[in-house]
Each structure stands twice: as structure tokens, then as C-alpha cells.
Image: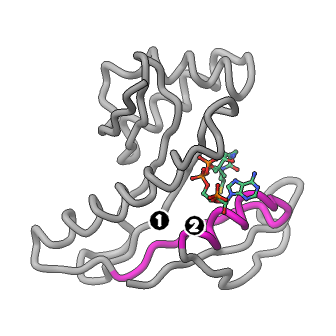
Amino acid sequence: MEKVIRYASEKDIELLITMYLTEVENHHQRAEQFAKDLVYKLKTLLCITDEKVIGTISWDRRGGLNDGVVELVGLGVNSSFRRQGIAKLLIITLIDEAKKYFSVDGCKLRVIYLFMERENKISKLFYKNVGFREASTIPAFYPDDDATIWIKYF
Ligand SMILES: CC(C)(COP(=O)(O)OP(=O)(O)OC[C@H]1O[C@@H](n2cnc3c(N)ncnc32)[C@H](O)[C@@H]1OP(=O)(O)O)[C@@H](O)C(=O)NCCC(=O)NCCS
């Protein structure tokens, strides 16, 4: 089945709500909040197949354009589509998009960083695989875990 990666728009709200309800939890209010955050607050790339969202990656610039800094705010692939290279494809697309975003104003992408739960072992393996490294730990950042900051320089 063909996979397409494209930016999320208002028209995708229902698709994102459905994905949250089936993949994350059966909670309508939080599903709607999730979908609206991805569409209105962040830049979100979707991986779509068969008219279903099977993966999302969300990012935004932090600081001024000259800083060249991006925060990767969220990444997820539906459980039945994991280990097929979809997250890798999403991150490669994000890097391309962020490079384009900064170059329009004559600036450069310098850094992508993200926060992750310290005990998220699969995430660690994934981000190592795509060239990130662990930079530091923030104690009690999440309700039930410390956070680690992972970073990639360009
Ligand atoms: C982390 C996550 C996004 C990875 O998505 P994915 O599409 O399965 O990842 P990819 O197939 O692109 O994996 C690329 C590489 O990462 C590593 N990796 C990914 N999942 C792994 C796993 N379960 N076990 C070991 N290594 C893994 C491997 O090196 C893999 O390469 P390989 O398959 O050739 O060995 C996915 O597991 C997920 O959505 N998890 C729940 C949400 C989450 O934790 N998000 C990140 C929060 S910071």
C-alpha cells in the first residue's frame, strides 16, 4: 500500500481524533485536544496510507530564526506499522522541511532537540539509530519519570 507524507491541516482533525481513540486511549476530550494541538499549534507531518493516519511527527522553531533551533515535540507510529522504517522516514522528512524553513530567510538549521521519558527504551534505540545523542537529564520532569534531552547537531 502506498504511503504519503504531508502536512496536517484542519481537514485532518477527524482522522487524528480517530487515530488517538484507537491507538492511544478512548478519551474524546483528550483526542480532540491532541488533534487541535497538532493542527493549530505545531507543524505536523502525517504518514497516510489507505486514508488512515499511521504516523505523526510534530515540530516547531524555538528562539529566533538565527538560532536555527527546532524542538521535535512528538513522534508516534501506529503499533501495527512499527519496525517498517516509518518513523525514520518521518524524521528524514522533518529534517528536510526544517532545512527549507530556515533557508527561506537565509538562516540554517543547527539543532534539533527533544524531551523523552528516561525509561522509554525503544525511543532511545530509535533516536540513537537516527543520529541523536543524549545531552542531559531533568529530574521529575514528567509526573512519573525524569526526562532526558536528546539532540542532533547539523
Ligand atoms: C519510537 C517509534 C516512533 C519508532 O517507530 P518505528 O516506525 O517503529 O521506527 P523505525 O521502523 O523507523 O525504526 C528505525 C530504527 O530504530 C530502532 N528501533 C525502532 N523500534 C525499535 C524496537 N522496538 N526495538 C529495537 N530497536 C528499535 C531500530 O534501530 C530501527 O531500525 P531497524 O528496524 O532497521 O533495526 C515507535 O515505536 C512509537 O511510536 N512508539 C510509541 C511512541 C513513542 O515512544 N514516541 C517517541 C516519544 S519521544
Q: Does the beta carbon at disc 2 come under 8 Å from ligand 1?
A: yes
Residue 144, given in percent of the width and then of the height, sits at 89, 54
Q: Which secondary structure lies at badge 1?
A: strand
Measure the alpha-carbon separation of dots 1 and 2. Answer: 6 Å
The disc, 1 or 2, on the residue closer to the chain's N-terminal end is 1
The residue labelled by disc 2 is: 114
Region rendered in magenta: 110-130
Residue 1 found in image quarter: top left
What scheme was used to colour the molecule? Answer: one colour
Apparent side of residue 53 relative to residue 107 in the rendered image (left or right)? right
The residue labelled by disc 1 is: 71
User: How dense is the environment of label 2, judged by Cα within 10 Å: few (below 14), some, or many (20 and up)?
Assistant: some
112 magenta-colored: yes
Residue sitting at x 54%, y 49%: 85
Marks 1,2: beta carbons within 8 A = yes
User: How dense is the environment of label 1, judged by Cα within 10 Å: few (below 14), some, or many (20 and up)?
Assistant: some
Identity of the amino acid at label 1?
Glu
Residue 60, given in percent of the width and then of the height, sits at 38, 58
Apparent side of residue 101 relative to residue 43 in the rendered image (left or right)? left
Residue sitting at x 35%, y 55%: 93
